[in-house]
Image (cartoon, rainbow, N blue to C red):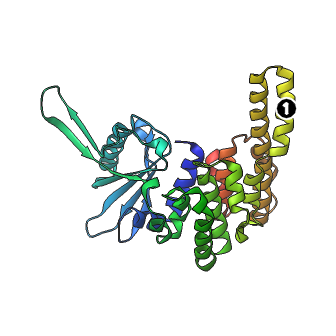
Amino acid sequence: MSKKFDAILKHLSEQYPQDWARFAGVSGPVTVIDADISTVTAAADKVLRVESAKPWILHLEFQASRDVTLPRRLLHYNVLLGIRHELPIRTQVILLRPDADGKELTGQVEWRIPHSQPYLSFEYDLLRLWQLPPEAILEGGLGTLPLAPLTNVAKLELPGLIGQMTQRLDCEAAPSVADSLWTATLILLGLEYEQAFANQLLRGVRSMKESVTYQAILEEGREKGLREGRKEGREKGRQEGRQEGRQEGREAGRAEEARRILLVQGTKRFGTPPPKVRRTMTQISDVRLIETLILRILDVETWAELLADLD
């Protein structure tokens, strides 16, 4: 699954675990626990401990593209998580778009020796997001609200859906929370729609108009990217070169603009960054990583905490 969408969904499920448990049909309190299974260099997407009379674990796995090995990986994660935490595990796969679906996804894994009964059977829950009515998300928690545009809603119906989302966020969320959720919505819209359409769809959202995060994604370094891309393309002298140059230019422009936004937001929250932080910033070229840091700003208190994972 694309790291960009992966980071957004992990962020949402970590910040709003109760909403995601509710989305999975789980009632009662839950807590986020470590999803790492480092002994085998693997990590599940998000793992929640359900605090019932007899605790158990809800494992959420998000999938945006097809992976024929997914059922085998789910079994792998399920067994290893059970061994690590010594609790029963329920695995739920959330397919974000039809491209992620495949005949291998049946909700069950069976291993057998030829011409004999299965010697191992494993079941998992399967949710195809595009088959859900939008009401299933609109009536849920705020933390799952960014999934609404990926449900069973026609393109022409999206403006009305965004209007319903706006009503909820305006009434129930602080401006900073609404900003974060709208940013997640914009990124997830990119799974199914062109970025220009997604930008236009959210352009009229009141709480997004002044959002520097939104403006950074909205522009995506477009002007600089196009200039550098055309220049690189002319130098290569071939169509392949022009395409490659434009893409490299766009990425460079996006990274530069996202870094600027990260510094602006960070300075406002933490104060002027020390020289070491500025040096670290200039070395980050991965746009997805910078966007993840932008989203993380609201969850940490210092520059050191923000960049802790980069050390």
The residue lying furthest to the left in this view is 116
Based on the displayed image, in which of its 4 quarters is residue 227 positioned?
Answer: top right
Q: Secondary structure at mark 1?
A: helix
The residue lying furthest to the front in this view is 156
User: How far across and how far down the image is residue 226, in percent?
Assistant: 83, 38
Side of 76 where 130 appears, left or right: right
Q: Is 114 located above or below residue 49 in the figure?
A: above
The residue lying furthest to the bottom in this view is 171
Tell me the residue that label 1 is attached to.
230
Q: Residue at x 63, y 53 (%)?
A: 187
Based on the displayed image, in which of its 4 quarters is residue 256 positioned?
Answer: top right
Residue in front for this viewpoint, 147 or 279: 147
Side of 89 where 40 appears, left or right: right
- Say which amino acid is labelled 1: Arg
Q: Is residue 190 visible?
A: yes
User: How far across and how far down the image is residue 153, in percent?
Assistant: 52, 59
Residue in front for this viewpoint, 55 or 226: 226
* The C terminus lies in quadrant: top right
The residue lying furthest to the top in this view is 237
Q: Is 18 located above or below residue 96 in the figure?
A: below
Side of 194 where 51 appears, left or right: left
User: How far across and how far down the image is residue 174, in percent?
Assistant: 64, 75
Q: Residue at x 49, y 41 (%)?
A: 99
* Label 1 neighbour load within 10 Å: few <14, some 14-19, many 20+: many
User: How far across and how far down the image is residue 185, in percent?
Assistant: 61, 59
Q: Is residue 279 visible?
A: no
Q: Is 117 located above or below residue 159 in the figure?
A: above
Residue in front for this viewpoint, 42 or 226: 226
